Amino acid sequence: MSKILSNTLRAAVAGALAAGLAVASTSAAQAQQRTVTGERYVPTIWIDPDGCEHWVMDDGAEGYMTPHTNRQGIPVCHPVNVCGVMNSDQLFATDSYRISASGRNALKDFFNKSSARAYIIAGHTDSRASDAYNMRLSYNRANAVAKVASSAGANIIDVRGYGERMPKVPNTSAANMQKNRRVEIICVK
């Protein structure tokens, strides 16, 4: 009787093993057939407002940035300067980031005459609205200027919105607030 039980048990174990292997091979086949699509990221160079280059990489899980140096270990930097400051009141209506026709023409003329290799566009506001609102408005205004620049053939390497965080003068009067509402064009030579 124990011999029959032993053979039955052996057959049951063999059947379970066979079924387990079949499931495992099916799972392995499904895993091989599964395709994961993702975005291909290409490392690039980012230039600070001071003109220094950084290698930038973002693999989707973690990003990093490291200074770009020459063979002697010296940072690679380009001469930069604020080559244009456009008063926002001349380009945009209040609470708007749509550029007027005359503003577009003035910007296109500026970019066509400039000899810079690339540009960084930075938007600024006064302090009348909330920080979040001003950040969004200044970024949208800088983007609007960057679109006009791109349409004129300019190489835009970065667009930034600083809101009210980098005033030229204290926001203590209407005249000072007007000076703070600006879009700066930083030229990279």
Image (cartoon, rainbow, N blue to C red):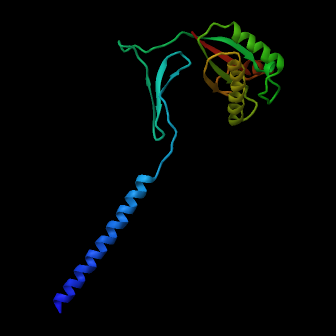
| Residue 87, image quadrant | top right
Residue 115 as seen in the image, left or right of residue 103: left
> Which of the image's four quarters has the N terminus?
bottom left
For the C terminus, give its image quadrant.
top right
Q: Is residue 146 above or below residue 108?
A: below
Q: Position of residue 3 (x, y in %)?
A: 16, 88
Query: How far from the left and from the top, in percent, is residue 142?
Result: 69, 24
Q: Position of residue 111 (x, y in %)?
A: 69, 12
Identify the residue at image location x=41%, y=17%. 69
Does residue 49 appear in the picture of this structure?
Answer: yes
Does residue 117 appear to the left or right of 132 in the view shown? left
Tell whether 56 sits left or right of 143.
left
Residue nearest the observer in this picture, 180 or 1: 1
Q: Picture coordinates of residue 12 (x, y %)?
A: 28, 80
Q: Is residue 169 something that shows in the picture?
A: no
- Residue visible at 75% across and 22% down? 172
Q: Where is 62 relative to 150, above or below?
A: below
**Residue 78 vertical position relative to residue 1 in the rendered view, above or below:** above
Q: Residue at x 31, y 74 (%)?
A: 16
User: How many marks can you see?
Assistant: 0
Task: Find residue 144 and report its image quarter.
Answer: top right
